Structures are given as structure tokens and as C-alpha cells.
Image (spheres, rainbow, N blue to C red):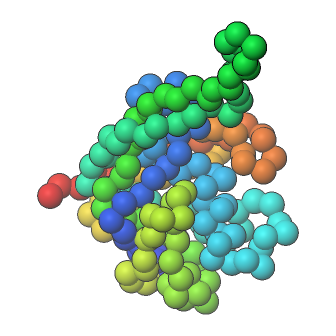
Amino acid sequence: MEKYYVVKYSGQFGFIKPWTAVRDSETFSQQFLTPSIVEGIEKKLFPELLSENGIKKIVGHRLSYTQISSQQEVIQTRGWNSTRQGKQILFDRPKAILLRGILLEPVLHLAFLTKADAESALSQHICLVRNEDLMLPVSLEEVSKYDFNNDTERFAGYELIFEKNEKSFIAGYHRLTNDVMHGWLKIVGTPVKQF
């Protein structure tokens, strides 16, 4: 039976940037990790893979949390608007307020095929997307692939399976190649934990 070495990470806050223009109130894309996010986490853990494309060492992941906190953020447009007032030209950058969903008490399980990779990951912190949202390693556990995929208590969470099939949907655009990313959402147990 195939073995996985699973590293558990936890933190106080975690933000996953929604990829859609309609923001997250329409798509709820802040509840799962896209292929490019998982690849970015892997490249942080294993910098020797920076010159390679694709996910090489992380064979599975699972994300859970206690709730999503909606927080307001003021943003400005990239460009400037100009208006003429008499002989003066005035420049302005419009502001807008948007809601960002922040995961509270996120827990992320990363599965590896080798103990050496898992031990290396266990010695490092990660971030889901923002650098200030640190997640620290908690434990390393050797489990069967079957248990990782079916134990609804220990490994509850959301996992986007990175493949294109009849259950798949567009999960964003790859941050490096701009290719369309597809996947289907696997839900194990209860991803939103009870207090």
C-alpha cells in the first residue's frame, strides 16, 4: 500500500486571493488552493525546483478553517484620471472599497512521497498567499494513501484535484504561464471546523 508523509501546518490567518473579476461573493474561490498556489508553496519549500515548471513533490493537500472573516480594504486604480480646472490640470487616482475574505485558523496538510521531503518541509514555515499570514509546521505523520484520502476526521478539508474531466471547472490562470487551470473540488469530512 502506498505511503504518504503528511506535514500539518496551522496559523492564525490565511488569505487566498480570488482569481475572478467578480470577487469572491460569486465564486467562493478563497476556499481552495489553485495549482499555481501549491506550486508556489512547493518552490518556497524546495528552492532547487525554482527553474522547473509544475508540481513535483507535493502529491496531495487538504485545507480547512474555522470561518471566513470579511474585511474591508481600500484600493486604488492603477491609472490616473486627469481633469482640467481653469489652467490647471488635476490628476486623481479613484479609490474603491472591496471585501476580502480571510480564513481564520487555517490548517493545511501537505502530502509527500518521501520522508526526506516531508522532514525538509517540517522544518520550514509557509504562507498560503500573503507573506504576513504565516503557517507553522505542527506535525509529521506517516499514513497510507487510502487513509489520507478517506479519513474524514484527521484529514478533513478542501482539495482541488488538478485535472480536467467532466467534474472540472476553471480554477484560474497560472501566475507564470497564464495557462487556464482546471480542477474539481474534493471535499473530505467537514472542512469548516467547529469551535
163 sits to left or right of 23 = right
**Most extreme residue toward the front, as rendered?**
87
Image x and y of residue 120, in percent: 59, 87
Q: Residue at x 75, y 14 (%)?
A: 87
Count of marks overlaid on the render: 0
Image x and y of residue 51, in percent: 85, 69
| Location of residue 149 with respect to 175 vertically, above or below | below
| Location of residue 110 with respect to 170 vertically, above or below | below
Residue nearest the viewer, comparing 107 with 100: 100
Can residue 43 be seen from the camera position used here? yes
Residue nearest the viewer, comparing 45 with 147: 45
Image quadrant assignment for residue 84: top right
Residue nearest the viewer, comparing 50 with 147: 50
Image x and y of residue 157, in percent: 37, 55
**Most extreme residue toward the left, as rendered?**
195
| Location of residue 59 with respect to 79 vertically, above or below | below
Q: Residue at x 27, y 49 (%)?
A: 67
| Location of residue 121 with respect to 186 vertically, above or below | below
72 sits to left or right of 166 = left
Q: Residue at x 35, y 56 (%)?
A: 64
Quadrant of image for the C terminus? bottom left
Q: Residue at x 30, y 62 (%)?
A: 105
**Most extreme residue toward the top, as rendered?**
86
88 sits to left or right of 145 = right
Image quadrant assignment for residue 106: bottom left
Image x and y of residue 193, in percent: 24, 55
Can residue 189 be seen from the camera position used here? no
